Image: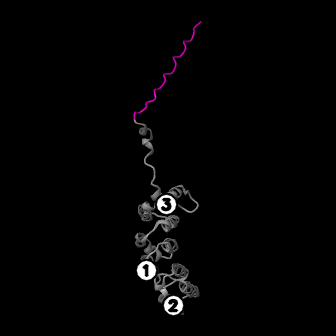
Amino acid sequence: MNAETPAAPAAKSKKVVSANPADRYSNAGPSPDPWARCALIEYGGDRSYAWTVRERVIHTPAAETGRTEQQLLKSLATPGRTEAGLAFICQMLAMVGSAKSVPALAPLLQDAKTTEAARYALQHITGPEADAAFLAALGTLTGNAKAGLIGSIGVRGDTAAKSALTAIKDAATEPAIVREAATRALARIATFKA
């Protein structure tokens, strides 16, 4: 009778452990930059990068707002920026934006597709630079977009806009919604001290 010889036990593979613990992650690549990724968010999509940025903006110490504003302006210039990304970045700029943000936001104010997001940010930025951007955009927009812009001017209480708004209110060529917005804005501005 032939007895089968038992098979030799399988050799145990030795796990190679690197002396550098970071090496085990080297194949993962770098983590995406949340400041750039927040510009690419989509409505109804993953907002984890936006939440990360939002938390950083909310908890920015007063001494760091300039740096945070610069990060957001860099995000605003991200290639392929989405509509949702633009709206999000403008919401964040409304919290920390200054006159330094106006040159980046002013062109967006003059485009009917981006004016609402830009208005939201600029409306919260104090100073004559933002007021000038609103006035400059008056001649570039029409219809609902122009009415919204006029509403923002009224909210800001820009007394320097009175003559431009009076002309719009009295212009028979303007749609009723624009003339009505000018009338309301003038009434609101009248409550501000000149």
Residue extent of the magenta highlight? 1-19
Q: Nearer the viewer, residue 194 or 92?
A: 194
Q: 101 or 143: which is nearer to us?
A: 101
Q: How many numbered marks have been drawn onto this rendered protein structure?
A: 3
Secondary structure that dominates the magenta span: loop
Amino acid type, callout 3: Val
Position of 61 relative to 30 (above/below): below
Q: Single out the residue that lies furthest toward the top.
A: 1
Tell me where residue 44 appears, x and y as whole percent. 58, 61
- Asked if the residue under mark 1 is in contact with the one under mark 2, i.e. CB atoms within 8 Å, the reply is no
- Check residue 132 in the rendering and tell me which mark sits there, or answer none: 1
Could you say where residue 135 lies in the image, as x and y percent from the top left?
45, 82
Whether residue 58 can be seen here: yes
Q: Is residue 5 magenta?
A: yes
Q: Is 54 located above or below residue 8 in the figure?
A: below
Residue 85 percent location from the top left of the image: 50, 64
Name the amino acid, label 1: Ala
In the picture of the structure, the residue carrying the numbered disc 3 is: 57
SS for callout 2: helix
Task: Please state if 17 lies on the left or on the right of 2 as rendered.
Answer: left
> Mark 3 and mark 1 in contact (Cβ < 8 Å)?
no
N-terminal of the pair, mark 1 or mark 3, is 3
Q: Does the magenta stretch include residue 8?
A: yes
Q: Which residue is drawn at 45% across and 62% down?
A: 62
Whether label 3 touches label 2, CB < 8 Å? no
Circle 2 sits on which residue?
A: 166
8 or 128: nearer the viewer: 128
Kindly identify which numbered label has been placed on residue 26. none
Instruction: Please tell me whether residue 15 is drawn above or below residue 28 in the rendered image.
Output: above
Whichever of labels 2 and 1 marks the residue nearer the N terminus, that label is: 1
